[in-house]
Amino acid sequence: MPKISDYEGIIGAEELAKLKRLAEELRGLSLLHINSAKDGGGVAEMLHSLIPLFNELGLKTRWEAITGTPLFFHTTKSLHNALQGAEVAITPEMLEEYKRVNRQNAERLDLRADLVMVHDPQPAALIEHKRKGKWIWRCHIDLSRPDRGTWALLAQYLERYDAAVFSMEEFTQALPIPQFIVPPSIDPLSDKNRELPPAKIDEVYEKYGINRDKPIILQVSRFDRFKDPLGVIELYRLVRKEIPCRLVLAGGAASDDPEGAEVYQEVLKAAERAPEVYVLDLPPRSDIEINALQRGADVIIQKSLREGFGLTVTEALWKGKPVVATAVGGIKLQVIDGRTGLLANSIPEAADRVKHLLRYPELARELGQAGREHVRKNFLITRHLRDYLRIYSSLVTR
Ligand code: UDP
């Protein structure tokens, strides 16, 4: 487990000292993070790294994940999809289950803390059971074009929080509470992101039977329609017409996402019709495997249709990889077109960008290096900790 001092080599002594000073003011306070899954997806990824560091910095920090029924998770996935702009029906029965499961979790969990940070819509209704402390709603999803009715359903809970945090300006909403902007981050010292010896990269590719005799195009994402895996296969077909290559789609399930298995089947079916596509359904905590796949890839794609932030993009940039991505949500903070990667708005455009990078490896290297610096300055966990500490500090009066 990395210690806070281990980050000094990456961010410098001064930045580290600032972080510690800020934490000193909050020493001894209790902090509780609540989300809906300890495995799968970006929120769990970040909390695994943030929680031990908060504790080391002196805040007594716990992490709880709510539990629920299949109908509850079907409901929350529908809420999630609607908030990202999809058309979905949410019935009164679903809403009743949403409230009931939140109520049940409120009875099961110890919600007492000086600061409670509730992540995403799934546990948002826990606010009805607030007893003490300051409650912050942390939104990780792409709220650029939410279904308005669904937003109104959620907003009735959010209004009761003390503050809300969004990943970018574009996602903020009309709410009667203070709103803060905090972009997500990666942990450069985690198994997902730390340096790996070349032999480890080879070993992982061999383990999955993927020959790197041709360039590797990779997308890492949960099997989710917003990540557009079928679009990735389409664009790969266009690239292959001109340049021999292989495609790797690496994904897995999140315990709070009931649609994953269905999307995975759709992807397998589409992959059968395209040669040399490797669809990997990875178990939770395949961090070193994903790290190695990213490091061994020639171009990394993120063809999302909506994206709260896209830690997979951050991970790729940190590894100095050239990225081709769609200009949606939080990806726009990370991929600055022509500087830290290439943006594309359609499948043919994305295919052209990938071909260009495969033809000009020097450009690919330059973009990758600039991407890594962009992440170092803006999207590392130490900056994220600092932003959270500042917000906590503004909310508690001691
Ligand atoms: N991830 C993983 N296994 C998978 C798919 C994704 O560990 O099979 C990780 C990925 O490396 C990243 C996170 O889950 O750290 C996904 O975060 P992102 O913000 O890209 O998307 P989300 O899944 O939260 O929508």
Image (spheres, rainbow, N blue to C red):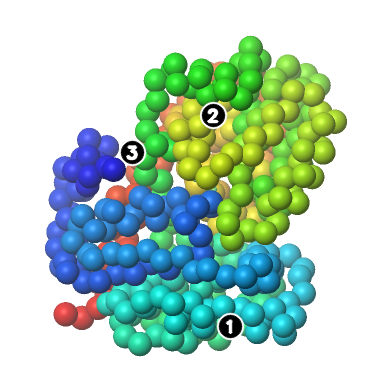
Q: Earlier in the sequence, mark 1 or mark 2?
A: 1
Which amino acid does the dot numbered 3 rest on?
Leu
If the image is split into quadrants, where does the C terminus sit? Answer: bottom left
Q: Position of residue 91 (x, y in %)?
A: 75, 80
Above-or-below relation of 249 to 185 = above
Do the residues under discs 1 and 3 have CB atoms within 8 angstroms? no
Residue 313 as seen in the image, left or right of residue 398: right
Residue 166 as seen in the image, left or right of residue 302: left
Which amino acid does the dot numbered 1 rest on?
Arg
Neighbour tally class for label 2: few under 14, some 14-19, many 20 plus, Cα within 10 Å:
many
Q: Secondary structure at mark 2?
A: helix
Residue 377 as seen in the image, left or right of residue 157: left
Q: Can you tell which mark lies on residue 189?
A: 3
Neighbour tally class for label 3: few under 14, some 14-19, many 20 plus, Cα within 10 Å:
some
Residue 89 as seen in the image, left or right of residue 115: right
Which residue is rendered at x = 43% and y = 86% of the image? 129
Which amino acid does the dot numbered 2 rest on?
Leu
Q: Quadrant of residue 372?
A: top left
Above-or-below relation of 183 to 295 = below
* Real-space Cα separation, disc 2 to disc 3, in angstroms: 17 Å
Q: Can you tell which mark lies on residue 293?
A: 2
Q: Earlier in the sequence, mark 2 or mark 3?
A: 3
**Disc 1: which residue:** 100
Q: Earlier in the sequence, mark 1 or mark 3?
A: 1
Q: Please say whether residue 110 is visible from this viewpoint.
A: yes
